[in-house]
Every structure is written in C-alpha cells, then in structure tokens.
Image (tube, helix red, strand yellow):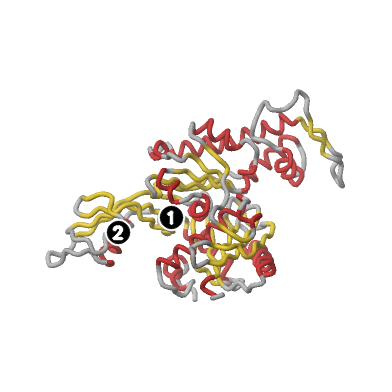
Amino acid sequence: MASNDLMVGLEIGTSKICVVVGESRTDGTTKILGVGQAPSRGVRKGEIVDFETAMQCVAEAVADAEQKSDLMIKSVYVGVGGAHIQSFNNRGSVLLPDDRDEIDEQDVEDAKISAREVSIPAQNAFLHCIIQHYHVDGQDGVLNPLGMLGQKLEADYHIIHGVRTRIQNTIRCVKELPLEVEDVVFTALASAQVVLSQQQKNLGALVIDMGGGTTDYILYVDGAVKQSGAIGIGGDHITNDISMGLRIPMARAEKLKTDEGSVTLGNCLPGETVVLKDDSGFAGKEIERETLNTIIHLRVRETFELLKKQLDEENFINYIGEGIFITGGCSLLPGIDHLAEDIFEIPARVAHAQTMSGLTSAFQNPQFATAIGLIKYAQAVQVERPQRRGLSRLISKFLPGIR
C-alpha cells in the first residue's frame, strides 16, 4: 500500500497513551490496522508535567502499535486537550476591488485572516479556525463562495486556541522520538469525526469526551461547530474521590470504579456490599455498593453541571436535535447517559467510533474514539489539501526556531 494511505493518530491522555494505525481506502472508509497502548505517566489533566517520563510512555505506545500493525511509524497526528483550550465565534469580511467581482481563493483566505484579527491572551496560539458559514453580499447559506459574483464576502468561523507552550511541549515530546508531527488537533474535534455522522452534525449534537484528566466537548448546530472547550475534571478525579472517601489505595479505587461502579443511585439491594480481598500492604475491606455509587454519582454530576454552566453562556444547546453523545473512558460507567439526560434535559447516549473496519474491538471501544478520530481527521485533511512536509507547517504556528 502507498505510504500516504497510512495515517497514525496519537493521543497522549492522562490515563493512557493510545496510538492507532489506519489505512485510507479508496471508498472513503478507514481500516484500523493496529492499536498500541501504554500506561500514561508524566501527564496530568491532559497536559505534560514530566517531559522525559511522558516521552518514554509515548515511545512504548508507538513501539506497541508498530508491533501490532507490522509497520514502521514515521509521522503522527497528535491530539491536544486540557483546560487551557478556549474558543469563540467570529466573523471575517473582505471587500472585493471595484475592477473585480468574482470571488477567488485569496478572498476566502483574507476573510479567514480577518476573522482571526481578534485579541487572544498573549501566551495563546490559534489551534483551529473552522468555517461555519459564508455570506456573499448578504446572501446566507453559501456553502462554497469560490467563483461566485459579489462585492462583499463574509465568513463565520469557530476559532479554537490554547496556551502555546503547552501545545509546544506535546509537539516536542513526539518530535524527540523522533517522529514527524503532521498536525495537532483538539481532542474533542477528533472524537466528533468518528462519533458523529454528517447528518447528526446537521441536526445538531453535543459530544462530551470524558477522559482520565479532562472532559472535552464540542457542539454542532446546522453542521457547524458552535462551541467547544474543556473542563479540568475526568475519571482520575472519581478514582481519587473513591480512594479518599473509602480510604483505599488508588490502584484499588480505580479497579473498584471500573469493575463495580455505577453512576446510578438507588439500584442496590439494602446492605449490598463489594468485598475487596486482602493483598500485600492492604488488609482487605467490605464496601457498601450504594456508598461507592454515591461517590461516583456526585463527581460526575458536578462535571456535567460545570459543563452545562459553560454551555449556557451561549444559546446553542437548545438547537441540538440529535442530543448528547458521550465518549471516552468514563463513558463506560453504567448509567452515565441517564444522568446526562437528567441534568441537560436532552436525550443522551454512549457513543463509539463509526464507519470503521479492521479491529472491531478498537472502534467499538469509546476509549479509542479520539485516536481513531485523528485518523479520520487526517483523511479529510489529505483530501482537502496537497501533501506537505509535516512539521514544516507547524513551525511558524507553534515552534519558531525549530528545524
């Protein structure tokens, strides 16, 4: 197969490093060839806090993916997240000169530049500038203005930005391996590529990606991204609550959460317990199941309520006809969709990657949605623009002075 048919998605998560190798098919579908994983260390709330340790973990996950797929990985699309990610909507406009009335590619690019001419924090960098809608001489609903006649082109964009140095650290971590970074992508945007169909985006949908350290989100209305961001709470916070509340080691708390935990309250028999067997350095313990579920419920409720508060700053959540799609590791907690429905008062479901072939266990696991989504993003990008040297286009954006 041609090398440009191969794409690799890399997610450096708080709980795990995930590397997915995919092959782009001529019919537009993607086949998963291999999935590599490694426990994540040196990462907190989706951001690198110990560079050397994180780099070691990424190297392990890449080696695992290479072994599983029997291919050598040379370049990757990297997911970035964290509570530092912010977004806003803005309109850019451009007036055509008097001697010309046909809109060309430069006009479209100038409108995009105009939309980005806003003040963001000095330490931040633009991550994505996603088109929402075009307007030509006041005409709404223009899908592609190229070749149209008009005097004024306006373009609405959803703009995502984050702290430059935090994004740089992720890129450097990968580059040191050494691997080329084809692009950096906001994790929720990546997940949405495989969790949502185009029709669901058109009808309006909210994707909530609940990972180990953060909860990322992205909201679509009329096929366009309207809101996105992240909250610095994830599955590790639930584990920590269980560890503190029940006075058990973190490793035991994590296993208890994933094996026995639920978000739903009131479903247990009176006095029903979970027995933790004794182990080296741990005397064993009997836990009331309802107590465990209450701890989980309260933390997930808090996360959803914080997210709802952010979303309510705009009015877009009232226009999501397809409802809420929950993905990421925390989505595996039983009852999480029902709690989301209670808080947002909108239908919610747990979702995983769609329209994939190959390793069924990979694309049916919501934990891999982001890494697989990075491949789908890469596939779309390669169709839209000619092949260019990977890291070179990131240099001016994030890594000045690096070659």
Residue at image x 69%, y 57%? 39
Residue at image x 60%, y 49%? 366
Which of the labelled discs sits on residue 161, or is there none? 1
x and y percent of residue 3 in the render? Answer: 54, 75
- Can residue 165 be seen? no
Q: Nearer the viewer, residue 270 or 254?
A: 270
Which of the labelled discs sits on residue 379, or is there none? none
x and y percent of residue 21 in the render? Answer: 60, 65
**In the rendered image, which residue does mark 2 sit on?**
144
Mark 1 residue type: His
- Can residue 394 be seen? yes
Query: Outermost residue, front direction?
Result: 27
Residue at image x 40%, y 66%? 384
Describe residue 396's horizontal placement relative to residue 302 as left or right.
left
User: SS class of the residue under badge 2?
Assistant: loop
Q: Residues within 10 Å of mark 1 (few under 14, many from 20)?
A: many
Q: Nearer the viewer, residue 329 or 395?
A: 329
Spatial CA span between label 2 and label 1: 25 Å
User: SS class of the residue under badge 1?
Assistant: strand
